[in-house]
Image (tube, helix red, strand yellow):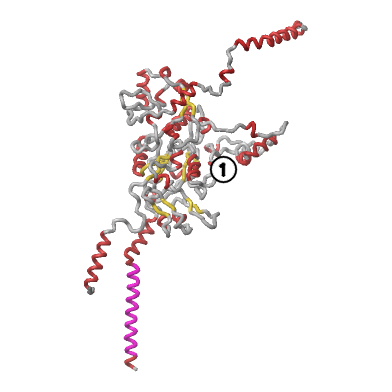
Amino acid sequence: MKLTRRGFFKIAGATGAAAATNRSAPAGASAPPDDPYGCLVDLTRCIGCRKCEEACNRVNGLPPPEEPFEDPTVLNRLRRPDEKAFTVVNRYFPGQLDASNQLVPTFVKIQCMHCQEPACASACIVGALTKKENGTVHYDVTKCIGCRYCMVACPFEIPAYEYHDPITPRVMKCTFCFERISKEGGLPGCAEICPTEAITFGRRQTLLKVAKDRIRDNPARYIDRIYGEKEVGGTSWMYISAVPFEKLGFIDVPNEPTPKLAETIQHTLFSYLWSPIVLYGLLGGIMWTSHKNRAEDEDEEGDRR
Amino acid sequence: MIRAFSPGAPVRILVALMVLVWAAPALAAETPDTDELTLNPEWRAPDQETARERAKEVVPFIEAVVDECQLCRQQRLRDVGLGVKDITHSYFLLDSPIIKQREDYYGPVRFMHTKHAAAIQDCAVCHHARPADKAAKETVRCSACHQESFRGDHPDRLGLKAAYHQQCIDCHRNEAKGPVDCVGCHPKNVPDHKELVKLPADPEPWDVTAECLRCHPGAGEDMLLTAHWLWKGHSAYTLDHQKKVMHGKGTTAINNF
């Protein structure tokens, strides 16, 4: 079959149109799952027993802690999750007083928020971090090359790195107990152990409703905000609290998904490879013109001789 | 006064003692033989056994409860005339299989039902809702409404473990009575230290400290970071730095231990 110039453009146009209409999912792997699992942390219920830390350590096989989990003096300083602890509980005194004039503590559990549109997964150049359908931001150690872009990208400063291990270092962060919650009836270790159900596990949409109901039914107990509902485009882990989140060490993040700007630029420039095509087309055009000019010049010079 | 110092008094005491020594075996023989009870290893406290058996029961889940305010409920319970006298089980062991199927790290918690009821005099504090079913009893056990956590059909119904903890801790805190820490209700399984502690015959205080630190090396370091040692300045935990303390082992006092 001989392809005419006109025929070629017809086929190319049809293919392009089909590709354009077929573009329901955004380019890249950042489409948030429809019905992910989540956890709702009710800070008014947390009693700071650190059982979640202990359970996390146990189910993930992490090394024993330097101070025992029963030691309440650990709460005297603020901590961050690290490569040996996927979750930590911090104690804040936001200023409320109880009946006996003592400051009332608020305990805040920190772990990976499992963003709906995770910046770490967007930044990961080898696809070691992915957002799974069940809501977990999953880390695949076999793909990881140790560039630690995820650590820079994370708006909540969560991923840690095993710097002490020069041979097989891993990026370490809360796994949302991926294996456990993938099983029917499985719960994350922390949510299972929590004695007061400060952590409620369930579908994210259900939890949002639960959170809104709790705030509506107890307006004196809660401030009207769900941290994680809209932050960085929504997160699987969400918090409700009696005091403003700014007083509890929560990072003030925008509602825009973190990867949005970078991905928009990236995807606009490289969709259908139009920018390289244009660039190389342009370069080719310049080359062709200059080549033609030079050939003409040479011809002219040859004529003169 | 003079008669008290007469030689008659010691003699009388001696006689009384002799009579006691002579009579003691006879008195003991008259009391019922308690050895049979205390020495029988098979013996179990009957109320403890009943409570243990009752703890194993799982009752059907109550889907719907009557939606009423706490005051209405209190008033209605008063109208019905329910009170401490109606309690059928005065002692419970909280050891439900609903919790144990998930985890089993603690022994059963003892709960004195009548004691709590007598102290609070208000059934509605704990029995805060009644089943919607008209035929059901007015007050039901915790585990009738609170069973597994995070049920799909009742996402905001507390699980049994959380129901216990929230109810107990909140009330103990508000009333400033009863234990609020973990080991207050969940007794810790501390091994018998009689065999573990090895001390010289007449130990000096520092021998005892050294012996403790032999197995608990962190305890000494921790102590040095606590207010017992660094007792100085304002309290970090009071608003506007109330309760300022300027004397103590951290500054002026000598450690006289």
Q: Is A165 left, or right, of A267 in this rendering?
A: right
Query: Residue B188, image x and y in percent?
Result: 54, 33
What secondary structure prevails in the magenta region? helix
**Would you place residue A161 above or below residue A294 in this image?**
above
Question: Element under label 1?
Answer: loop
Question: Is residue A145 rendered to the left or right of residue A266?
Answer: right
* Residue drawn at the location 51% of the way across and 49% of the way down: A82
Q: Viewer-proximal residue, B147 or A184?
A: A184
Residue position for label 1: A67
Whether residue B257 can be seen here: no
> Between residues B6 and B144, which one lies in front from this camera angle?
B144
**Who's the residue at 37% across and 21% down the image?**
B77
Residue A104 falls within the magenta-colored stretch:
no
Q: Nearer the viewer, residue B112 or A99?
A: B112
A296 is within the stretch colored magenta: yes
| Rendered image quadrant of residue B85 | top left
Highlighted range, magenta: A275-301
| Residue A288 position by quadrant | bottom left
Mark 1 crowd level (few <14, some 14–19, many ≥20, 10 Å Cα): few
Residue B4 appears left or right of A78:
right
In the rendered image, residue A25, in percent from the top left (x then y), is placed at 31, 56
Q: Is residue B29 above or below residue A22?
A: above
**Residue A125 point in image, percent of width and height:** 42, 60
Which residue is pictured at 76% across the width and 8% down the height?
A: B5
Residue lying at the far bottom of the rendered structure: A305
Q: Which quarter of the figure is the C terminus of chain B placed in?
A: top right
